[in-house]
Image: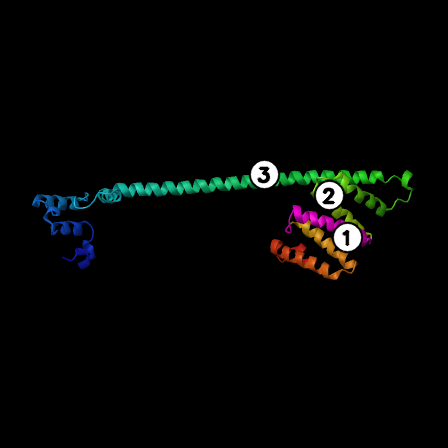
C-alpha cells in the first residue's frame, strides 16, 4: 500500500509508522495482537515513544519535549537568558581587557617619550657645554656645534634608534634653517629610514621627517623625489587625519 505521508503529509511520523506496521505483509513483523496495536496508539496519543520504531536519543528527547512543553519552554528561556548573560559578561570582559591593554600601551609609549625627551635634553646640554669659547674661539658657529653633535650621534646613541632619529631630525631641520641643505639631507634621510622601520609610515613623526626632507630636496633641485615624498605624506595624512586637519592642509 501507499504510505500515508504520500497521501497527506500530516500523517508522516508515528501515525504512518503504526499503520505501516499494522499492514506489514510478513505477519511476524506485524503487531501480534490488537492489544499491541492499541498500546502503540495510546503511546502515540500520550506522546510516549512507540514500539513500532527504533528508540533513538533524539526521538526520546523529542517525545519528552512534547510531553513537557512548559518545562522545556522554561528551560529554553533560562538557557537563552543564561547564554545572553554569558555573552554580555564576555563582551564586557573583553572590553575591559582591551581598555587595560590600551592603557598599558599608552603608559609604555608615555614612558618611552619621557625617556626620549630626557635623552634629547641631555644630548643638547652636552652639545652646548662642549662649545667652549676658550678652546674654539669666541666666535663659535652654530654650524660647527651642529656638526660636532651630528658626529657624536652614532657613538652616544647606539641601541636607541628612536632618540637617534629624533636628534637627526632636529639637527637636519636646524641645518635647513641655516641654508646648509647638503648637510641636512643625509641626516634627514637617516632619520626617515629609522622612523619608517621603527614607527611605520603612518606615524606623525615619520611624516614630519618626510616633509622636512622633501623641503631640503626641493632646495637642492631634486624635485621629482621631493614631490613623491610630499604626495606620500599628503595621502597618509588624508587617510589618518582627514582632509580638514591643519597638518593635511599644510
Relative horizontal placement of residue 239, taking residue 74 as reference (left or right):
right
Residue 164 has which mark? Answer: 2
Give the total number of marks visible in the rendering: 3
Callout 2 secondary element: helix
Q: Is 45 displayed left or right of 243 in the figure?
A: left
Q: How far apart are marks 3 and 1 (CA)?
A: 37 Å
Q: What crowding class fits label 2: few (fewer than 14 Cα within 10 Å), some (14-19), or many (20 or more)?
A: many
Name the one closer to the observer, 241 or 186. 186
Q: Earlier in the sequence, mark 2 or mark 1?
A: 2
Please name whichever residue, 21 or 103, is drawn nearer the observer in this view of the structure. 21
Disc 3, SS:
helix
Q: Which residue is drawn at 76% across and 42% down?
A: 154
Where's residue 1, x and y in %? 13, 57
Left or right of 109 in this view: 146: right
Query: What's the mark number on residue 223?
Result: none
Task: Identify residue for label 3.
Answer: 104
The answer to whether residue 195 is magenta is: yes
Q: Is residue 234 at all visible to an observer of this figure? A: yes
Secondary element type, mark 1: helix
On the image, which quarter does residue 225 sit in? bottom right
Q: Mark 1 points at which residue?
A: 185
Tell me which residue sits at (55%, 39%) in the image: 100
Answer with mark 3 or mark 1, whichever residue precedes in sequence: 3
Of badges 3 and 1, nearer the viewer stands: 1
Q: Do the residues labelled 3 and 2 touch (CB within 8 Å)?
A: no
What is the magenta range?
179-202
At a point 70% along the width and 43% down the height, the residue shown is 161
Amino acid at each position: 500500500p501507499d504510505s500515508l505521508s504520500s497521501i497527506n503529509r500530516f500523517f508522516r511520523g508515528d501515525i504512518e509508522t503504526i499503520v505501516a506496521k499494522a499492514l506489514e505483509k510478513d505477519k511476524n513483523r506485524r503487531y501480534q495482537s490488537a492489544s499491541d496495536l492499541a498500546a502503540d496508539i495510546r503511546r502515540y496519543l500520550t506522546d510516549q515513544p512507540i514500539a513500532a520504531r527504533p528508540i533513538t536519543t533524539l526521538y526520546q528527547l523529542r517525545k519528552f519535549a512534547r510531553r513537557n512543553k512548559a518545562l522545556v519552554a522554561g528551560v529554553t528561556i533560562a538557557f537563552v537568558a543564561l547564554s545572553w548573560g554569558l555573552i554580555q559578561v564576555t563582551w564586557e570582559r573583553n572590553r575591559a581587557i582591551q581598555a587595560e591593554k590600551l592603557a598599558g600601551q599608552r603608559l609604555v609609549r608615555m614612558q618611552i617619550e619621557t625617556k626620549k625627551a630626557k635623552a634629547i635634553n641631555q644630548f643638547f646640554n652636552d652639545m652646548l657645554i662642549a662649545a667652549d669659547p676658550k678652546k674654539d674661539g669666541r666666535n663659535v658657529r652654530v654650524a660647527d656645534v651642529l656638526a660636532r653633535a651630528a658626529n657624536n650621534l652614532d657613538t652616544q646613541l647606539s641601541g636607541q634608534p628612536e632618540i637617534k632619529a629624533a636628534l637627526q631630525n632636529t639637527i637636519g631641520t636646524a641645518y635647513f634653517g641655516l641654508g646648509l641643505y647638503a648637510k641636512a639631507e643625509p641626516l634627514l634621510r637617516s632619520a626617515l629610514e629609522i622612523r619608517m622601520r621603527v614607527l611605520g609610515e603612518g606615524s606623525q613623526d615619520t611624516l614630519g621627517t618626510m616633509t622636512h626632507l622633501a623641503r631640503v630636496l626641493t632646495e637642492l633641485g631634486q624635485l621629482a623625489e621631493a614631490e613623491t615624498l610630499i604626495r606620500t605624506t599628503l595621502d597618509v595624512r588624508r587617510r589618518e587625519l582627514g582632509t580638514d586637519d591643519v597638518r593635511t592642509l599644510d
